[in-house]
């Protein structure tokens, strides 16, 4: 058997090898390594940001529905929603009928909706558009995400940001620091002697290149997360069922993938894990054909997960500290296509939920008749939303992360 040298370890880890180190899906459980690495519990009163990414380009016009606008019905003759179908928020706007929990948050004044959010010179590519949203750099590609740059600016505690899932999104990667990746469903135990060897291999060395140093830091961060989360995740499978056999959201006894992610976040918040940012995600929003049923199913999963998350926090002293922000890389075009769906568009709504929001609509709604080659014209730069999350939730200077002074919107009180 080949000797596992430190050089081989770092090379394999940086290549996202199948052994699953440095935050990738792996072979480590919460019972094995660094139980003593648990950090100081997060005091109540420290704000917590949960970033929800909806991959695929969610159709904002069939999510936040301008049911009183005749231009909407003209463009969506076969799969639009009328005033009797939507969950009415006021005399002009309503939520998709699958979003009953979000409608309750609105009634409880715990939901803010930012309309017309986008970026300059929009791009219809999923990859480029999501890259722009996650790096907060609309004019030129960069190698760091907006949460990653916040991590770079605020210390070296690996628990400051945690991605629920084994693949780090670009938003969570900084120049010298990354968020920790966390996955309870695929972790396996290592023998004690091998665990000790890996710990030594992951230690920093003065001869490391910058890339090797980042890998070593990432590995140590993941081990710290494992030790800290172990008391929270012990028995999670027994409580929540087998992740590979569970039924979809809404079925008796079942949880969706997003629901499981957010329920884990809720458990962490209540356990005072010292994490300020959690990132969760759900895909499946690229609705080029047969959109209505598909999107309702996806939005129903989001709705059940988000409302269940806030229900799980009820009564906890830290419940009022949590803000959830949900976004997608772009909206869809106004006009339906020939396949009962919609194609890639531009601006869409961003949802911000929690006890600390200024409930209601924010930013002007885009016109459905004054279009840019069939696309909505954005009325709000997405960095204005990020600026407020950084300032009001994380207590950071937005200019250090966004590269310029961007005014907030008054979404948070």
Image (cartoon, rainbow, N blue to C red):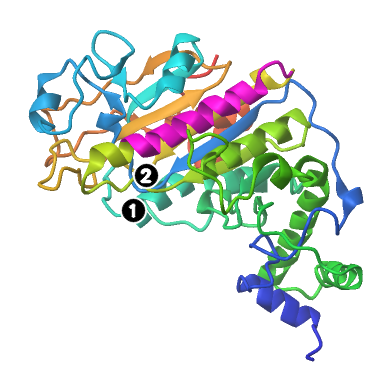
Q: Residue at x 61, y 47 (%)?
A: 164
Q: Is residue 217 above or below residue 13?
A: above
Please give the name of the residue rendered at 74% of the width and 56% of the height, measured from the top-left corner: 222
Q: Quadrant of the N terminus?
A: bottom right
Over which residues does the magenta segment extend? Answer: 296-316
**Which is nearer the N-term, disc 1 or disc 2?**
1
Does 8 appear in magenta? no
Residue 298 visible in image: yes
Does the magenta run of residues contain 308? yes
Question: Is residue 70 shown left or right of residue 130?
Answer: left
Residue 386 in the image, given as x and y percentages of width and height: 49, 33
Q: Which mark is residue 329?
A: 2
Taking the image as shown, residue 407 lies to the left or right of residue 45, namely left
Q: Nearer the viewer, residue 396 or 41?
A: 41
| Residue nearest the viewer, comparing 321 with 89 | 89
Q: Secondary structure at mark 2?
A: loop
How would you rate the neighbour count of disc 1 (Cα within 10 Å): few for under 14, some for 14-19, many for 20 or more?
some
Label pair 1/2, CB-CB below 8 angstroms: yes
Left or right: residue 399 versus residue 327 is right
Which residue corresponds to mark 1?
A: 126
The majority secondary structure of the magenta stretch comes to helix
Q: CA distance from mark 1 to mark 2?
A: 7 Å
Q: Nearer the viewer, residue 174 or 335?
A: 335
Please identify the quarter of the rendering in which residue 59 is found: top left
Q: Quadrant of the C terminus?
A: top right
Q: Nearer the viewer, residue 194 or 295?
A: 295
């Amino acid at each position: 058997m080949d000797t596992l040298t430190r050089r081989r370890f770092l090379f394999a880890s940086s290549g996202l090898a199948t052994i699953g180190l440095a935050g990738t899906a792996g072979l480590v459980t919460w019972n094995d390594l660094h139980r003593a690495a648990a950090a100081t519990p997060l005091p109540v009163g420290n704000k917590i940001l949960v970033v929800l990414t909806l991959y695929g380009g969610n159709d904002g016009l069939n999510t936040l529905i301008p049911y009183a606008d005749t231009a909407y019905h003209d463009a969506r003759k076969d799969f639009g929603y009328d005033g009797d179908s939507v969950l009415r928020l006021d005399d002009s706007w309503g939520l998709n009928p699958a979003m009953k929990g979000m409608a309750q948050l609105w009634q409880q004044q715990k939901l803010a909706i930012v309309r017309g959010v986008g970026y300059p010179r929009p791009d219809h590519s999923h990859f480029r558009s999501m890259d722009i949203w996650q790096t907060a750099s609309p004019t030129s590609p960069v190698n760091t995400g907006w949460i990653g740059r916040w991590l770079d600016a605020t210390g070296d505690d690996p628990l400051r940001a945690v991605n629920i899932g084994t693949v780090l999104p670009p938003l969570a990667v900084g120049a010298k620091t990354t968020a920790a990746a966390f996955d309870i469903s695929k972790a396996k135990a290592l023998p004690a002697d091998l665990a000790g060897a890996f710990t030594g291999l992951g230690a920093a060395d003065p001869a490391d290149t910058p890339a090797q140093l980042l890998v070593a830091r990432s590995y140590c961060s993941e081990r710290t997360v494992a030790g800290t989360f172990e008391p929270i995740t012990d028995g999670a499978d027994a409580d929540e069922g087998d992740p590979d056999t569970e039924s979809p959201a809404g079925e008796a006894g079942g949880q969706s993938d997003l629901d499981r992610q957010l329920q884990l976040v809720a458990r962490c918040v209540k356990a005072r894990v010292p994490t300020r940012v959690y990132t969760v995600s759900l895909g499946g929003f690229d609705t080029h054909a047969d959109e209505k049923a598909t999107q309702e199913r996806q939005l129903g999963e989001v709705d059940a997960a988000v409302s269940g998350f806030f229900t799980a926090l009820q009564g906890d002293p830290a419940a009022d500290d949590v803000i959830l922000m949900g976004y997608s890389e772009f909206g869809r075009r106004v006009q339906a296509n020939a396949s009962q769906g919609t194609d890639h568009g531009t601006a869409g709504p961003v949802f911000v939920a929690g006890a600390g929001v200024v409930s209601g609509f924010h930013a002007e709604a885009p016109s459905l008749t004054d279009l840019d080659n069939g696309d909505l014209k954005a009325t709000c730069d997405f960095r204005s939303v990020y600026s407020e999350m950084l300032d009001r939730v994380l207590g950071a200077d937005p200019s250090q992360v966004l590269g310029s002074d961007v005014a907030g919107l008054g979404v948070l009180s």
